[in-house]
Image: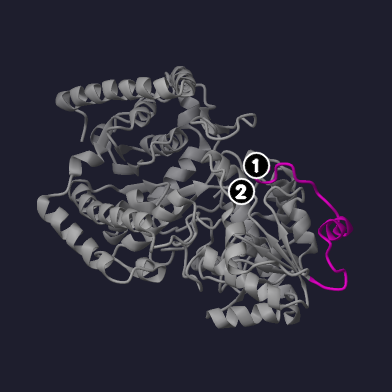
Amino acid sequence: MTLGRFSAWRLVLLDLRYFGSVAFRALRDWRGLVLERDVWRDWWRFRRSARGVLDALSPGGNTRGDILIVSLSGMIYSTKLEGVLAKALQLRGYDPVVLTSRYAFWARRYFSLYGVRRFIFVEDFSATPTEIEVARKRCEEFMSGPVDLPTCKAWNFEGASVGQYAVSTVARSLHRGMPDFRDPKVRAMLGDQLLHCILGIFRAKRIFAGLHPEICLFNEINYSDYGPVYAVAYQQGLNVIQFVHALRDSALIFKRSVPETYRIHPNSISRSEMNRLSTLPWGTKHEEMLQGEFRGRYGGNSFIVRRDQAGKQMKDREAVYSQLGLDRRKKVAVVFSHILWDANLFYGDDLFDDNEHWFIETLRAACRNDRVNWLIRLHPAIGWKRELDNDMSELNELVAIRKHVGTLPAHVKLLMPDNDINSYSIFEIADYGVTIRGTVGIELPCFGVPVLTAGTGRYSGLGFTVDSATRNEYINRLLKIHEIPMLNDAQTLLAKKHALAVFCLRPWVMKAFGNAYDTEIKGFHPLNPSVFLRATKFEDLDGSDDLRKFAEWAADRRSYDYLEKWPLAEEVSADSGAVGTM
């Protein structure tokens, strides 16, 4: 819908309500006014830079169709990134439509600077009395039976994984990997989220009954707000694209949702694409390019890496052994723990109920096998993620260890998130890695190190990881991990090709726009990170190669992954990581 006169007046009233809420919050905490001032300043600066560059293009009668941008978070950074992609497609004749909330004050204003003029609001698709009754009845039926995590994860409504969306939203809000469904508060939260998800399915169907976009863009496709919209778009066979951050500044990863890629982590290589890549040549320049990527990733060449590796130092093998008190007569198995409450139910099928269940059972097996040194590395991102949410409680991992495992034996060492050892130094001492489906399963095999997985998806089954079909098989492998051989040359080469594609060819690097980070800011700030405009005139924007390549890939449904061309030897630069064009 294009905003009409009546809608515009309603938005004026909502804006007045927003200003009132800002004033009310300021009475309780004046620091909120400081953040509000910062956002206004950013909006005005962005508006000045956008004038004459991001001016709206009218598709007129030659439009190639609508694109739907699902923008429900209200986060300014996400809104700016979504605006970049909207502009890329608008420049190629598409007409962007944003699905957001009427109460998303800043989202509407920032999108307008990108030339977006069409909005639809979730509040305009309220459920009918019949739908509300159906949703309540289904939720009551489910909640009246035994409620546990496996049951919730398996519960669908009209083909949508509403149980997963609801449970993950609850776990994320509580910062707990395994919500206690005996707790009345948790049960109430779960019931509310299940109802919200089912009503979201009805809402999404009504949205797509009146809108038939050529492309649907999602940043998040999980949790209770986004999941229902994504599920309906996917079920209707629409051209659905998810974008997530790459592990480098000013770069994104794109993945198209099709049956082959459904419930696969977006920062991955599709099976069909990997089959093609496995046949491509590998030479000295490719090796230099990959090793240069590793050095840069853990050497702090981007803010995203520096944030995870803050305060950490490169240390040689002897220094790490001495610092951690490892037995030099034994090999080292490293468990790369996941964040227990962070989006842990979607990408593939897990052997265990959730991340916390996996963590506990893996730790119990490690305690039983004293033939190796066990290093339990807690995820380094825990610190800054908890800081963003102002979470000062005890680490979930420590609570889980105390409750389910007890005192750790001498051969099992716990590496806290704030330790001073760079992750690359951990790689250099590791003889084995253990994960569910973390990035380490891409990295360590490049050094011939076997990685045991506890879930499908992303890279399992490609031929360079040790995958288990059952919990017992996985646990038995942990108990005999010292008997597992190093990867052979063919497996290591396959892992290197996969890693080169994921780390160097998958990222879409912005040129017309860029990311800005303030390393001095601690905790949450609505503008950290942020997006700025590099192009200074419309001709530069219109001719920007990065925007063109994304738009062309988005329109071509034959390609599942955005992927740069496999580099020829003469196209590889070990210093810059540059590769050939698509």
In the image, residue 349 above or below residue 517: below
In the image, residue 252 above or below residue 534: below
Which residue is rendered at x = 43% and y = 63% of the image? 263
List the single residue furthest toward the left: 130
Residue 366 is drawn in which quadrant? Answer: bottom right
Label 1 Cα neighbours within 10 Å, binned few <14 / some 14-19 / many ≥20: some
Q: Which residue is mark 2?
A: 381
Nearest the viewer among 58 and 213 is: 213
Is label 1 in contact with label 2 (beta carbons under 8 Å)?
Answer: yes
The amino acid beneath tag 2 is Ala
Q: What percent of the width, then of the height, locates residue 441?
A: 63, 64
Visible in this render: residue 222?
A: no
Which residue is rendered at x = 50% and y = 72% of the image? 352
Apparent side of residue 483 relative to residue 14 in the rendered image (left or right): right
Q: What percent of the width, then of the height, locates residue 551?
A: 42, 43
Which residue is rendered at x = 76% and y = 58% of the image? 426
The stretch in magenta equals: 306-331
Measured in 3D between alpha carbons, the distance from the residue under mark 1 to the one under mark 2, in whole angstroms, is 8 Å
Apparent side of residue 36 relative to residue 437 in the rendered image (left or right): left
The amino acid beneath tag 1 is Arg
What label does residue 51 carry, if any? none
Which residue is rendered at x = 38% and y = 66% of the image? 153
Q: Which residue is mark 1?
A: 307
Secondary structure category for the residue under label 1: helix
Label 2 Cα neighbours within 10 Å, binned few <14 / some 14-19 / many ≥20: some
The tag earlier along the polypeptide, 1 or 2, is 1
Secondary structure category for the residue under label 2: loop
The N terminus: image quadrant: top left
